[in-house]
Image (spheres, helix red, strand yellow):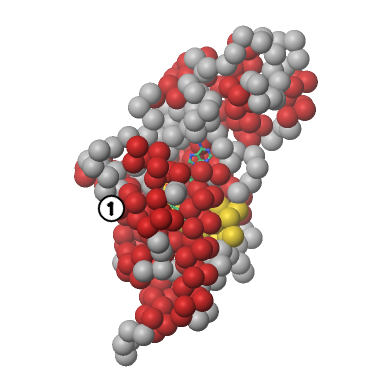
Amino acid sequence: MKRILSGIQPSGKLTLGNYLGALRNWVNIQNEYDCMFFVADLHSITVTQDPKTLNENIKRIIMQYIACGLDPNKSTIFIQSHVHEHAELGWILNNSTYMGELGRMTQYKDKSAKQQNIKVGLFDYPVLMAADILLYDADYVPVGEDQRQHLEMTKTIAKRFNAQYGETFKIPEPYILKEGAKIMSLQDPSKKMSKSDSNPNAYISLFDEKDVIIKKFRRAVTDSLNTVRYSDEQPGIKNLINIYSCITGKNIQEIETEFEGTGYGKFKDTVADSVANKILSIQEKYNQLNKPENENIIKEVYQKGCERASSIASNKLKHVYKSVGFVVD
Ligand code: TYM
C-alpha cells in the first residue's frame, strides 16, 4: 500500500480552507492508502503562541480530525512533538539545504515581511517539513496549493541527500486536487483564507455558528456585476463558486445555470447554507467527542498513533545516521 502523510498546524481554529484544501481529501483516501496524519505542533511555535491556547488547540485538532471523518482504525493519527525523530532528522537535513533556497520560499517572505525580529525557526521551517515527510517514506502528500513550494523543497533536499550519501529517501509527490486547493479570503479574494488572518470576517472557522457563517458570506467581497460567473474578473464570486462546488459536488456549469438571473444575495445565502450544514454536522460530532469521559479515548488515539509513527521513524533515522557515517551500534 502506498503511503500518505500530511499535517496541520495547531496555530488557531481550523478554517473552511483547511477543510476543503486538506482534511476533506484525507478522509476520502483513507481506504486506499496507508495514511499518517499528524498535528504539526513543532511548526506552530515558529510564530509566537500562548502556551495554554496552544495546548488546547493541539487536542482540539485531534478531535476535529476525527469529527471531520478520519478514522483512527484506518489512519495513524499522532502529534509531531511526540516523535522526537522529526526534530532530529530536521537537524541532519539542515546540512543538505542552502540558505538561499530557504530565503526564496514565498511563505517565509510573506511572514517575515510582517516582523522585525525573524526567528531562525521560521526560516528553517521547510527543512522540518521535509523531515516530517522523508521520515516515513511518504509516496504522496495531500495539501493545499500554498504548500506546493515547500514540497518542491522537500524533493530537492531528498535528491541532494541521496546523491551525497546514497539512496536513503523516497522522493514524495504532492497530491493536490484542483478543487478546493486554494480557498480565498472572503474579504480579499487575492489572499488565501487563513486561520491567522486578523479579520475574522475573512475566514470561516469550523467552530463558527450558523448565523455567523451566514453573516460572513453576506459580507463577502464581490463586485457590482451581479452575475454568477466563474471568471478571473470576478475573483470573489469565483471563490464562492469554488466553495459551493466543493461542498455540493456540483460542477461549475451546473452552478452557473442554477443561479442564472438571480442576484448575489440569493447566491451568497445558498452557499452559506450549504457550508453551514456541513460545518454543523462536523460540530455535532466534535461536541460528542469533546466530553470529559472521552478524554482517554482521544489520548489513546494519539498514543497509539505515536507508537506506530515512532517505530517507522526510528528505523528510518537509524538508516540516515548510518548513511551519514554516525556510529549507530
Ligand atoms: P497549515 O496548517 O497552514 O494548513 C493545513 C492544510 O490546509 C491547507 N490550506 C488550504 N487549502 C486550501 N485553501 C486554503 N485557504 C488553505 N489554507 C490552508 C494547507 O495547504 C495544508 O494542506 N506546513 C504545513 C503543515 C505541515 C505539513 C508537513 C503538511 C508541516 N509538515 C508535512 C504536509 C506534510 C502548514 O503550515 O499547513
Q: Is residue 40 above or below residue 308?
A: above
Q: Is residue 214 left or right of residue 267?
A: left
Q: Nearer the viewer, residue 83 or 62?
A: 83
At x 39%, y 30%, the residue is 197
Q: Is residue 300 left or right of residue 182?
A: left
Q: Nearer the viewer, residue 72 or 14?
A: 14
Structural crowding at the residue carrying mark 1, measured as other residues with C-alpha within 10 Å and reported as few (<14), some (14–19) or many (≥20):
few
Q: Is residue 245 left or right of residue 86?
A: right
At x 38%, y 23%, the residue is 199
**Image coords of residue 75 (percent x, y):** 51, 59
Which of the image's four quarters has the N terminus? bottom right
Q: Inspect the image, locate mark 1, and give the three-letter code of the amino acid beneath it.
A: Val
Helix, strand or loop under label 1: helix
**Image coords of residue 3 (percent x, y):** 56, 65
Q: Nearer the viewer, residue 26 or 196?
A: 196
Q: Which residue is mark 1?
A: 120
Look at the image and tell me whether residue 79 can be seen.
no
Figure quadrant of residue 42: bottom left
Q: In the current view of this chain or complex, which residue is farthest to the bottom?
A: 329
Q: Is residue 33 above or below residue 312?
A: above
**Image coords of residue 293 (percent x, y):** 31, 47
